[in-house]
Amino acid sequence: MEPKRILLTVTYDGTAYCGWQFQDNGPSIQAEIEKALEKALGTFTRVTGASRTDAGVHALGQRAHFDTDSSIPPDKYPFVLNRFLPADIRVTESVPVPPDFHARFDAAGKWYTYRIHNAPHPSALYRNLTAHVPVRLDAEKMNAAARQLLGTHDFAAFAAAGGQAKTTVRTIDDVSVTRSGQEITLRVHGDGFLYNMVRIIAGTLIYVGQGKLEENCISRAIASKNRLDLGVTAPACGLELTRVEYAFEKAGMTP
């Protein structure tokens, strides 16, 4: 049978994992999915993810592809793989894609969400899904500062050491900071993100909300390209890869 390329949508709680990508120092999301595929297909199958989320980062809509000559219908992989996956990882969708499709390099855009529990005491229920900030934050100032991200810029100041990007130019076309009760939510959409970029944005906005940085700090950092003009890198537990988008989905087409 001719090999098929399958695109998965994966959701996971990243608390117990060293990140998406296989590593020697602990369990990874990629390794767990590859183990499930091996049990289902009877052979080792490499999985390629769209985003290399870090240790403790979560996903609602991670995407990943693999090749197989199995007779399993392309849309049935969630039912097959979820039998073998741990409870904190679930495949929610699977579709066939062309043989030259690449989950990472063909991504047209990504949505990230960062959640802050802004209350005197940490949340017992959501402690693994939110970052705790006990001092009340000014969400309106945070939102005003976040708007400075919009557009195409050189985001060199927003890249953590260790990144391997060939260019630090990115386009952010949607961003917002909102409050609902004790939860503050940052949502950001762009064509791509640098290593730890969203966590650096979140940490900077937290400083703005606390009055530790001025609202124009983001514009200043874009101009200076100096990481020291920004705030700390926010904890991984508040970050969620919400959605990875592809051109065929934006156009309402099948792959």
Image (cartoon, helix red, strand yellow):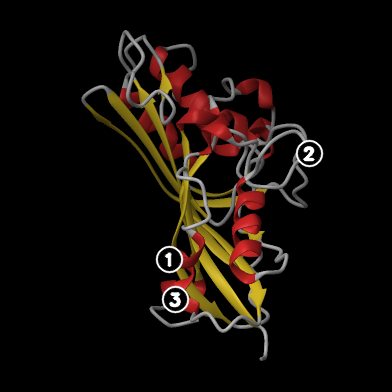
Q: Amino acid at mark 1?
A: Phe
Disc 2 marks a residue whose amino acid type is Asp
Q: Is residue 6 above or below residue 147?
A: below
Instruction: Look at mark 2 in the image and give the residue it sits on.
Output: 24
Packing grade of label 1 (10 A; few <14, some 14-19, many >=20) is some
Q: State the image coordinates of residue 99 (x, y, percent, origin top left).
A: 66, 82
Q: Of tags 2 and 1, which is closer to the observer?
A: 1
Name the residue carrying label 1: 79
Q: Secondary structure at mark 1?
A: helix
Q: Residue at x 61, y 50 (%)?
A: 32
**Would you place residue 150 above or below residue 204 in this image?**
below
Whichever of labels 2 and 3 marks the residue nearer the N terminus, that label is: 2
Q: Position of residue 13 (x, y in %)?
A: 47, 40
Q: Residue furthest left?
A: 181
Look at the image and tell me in which quarter the N terminus lies: bottom right
Residue bearing the label numbered 3: 75
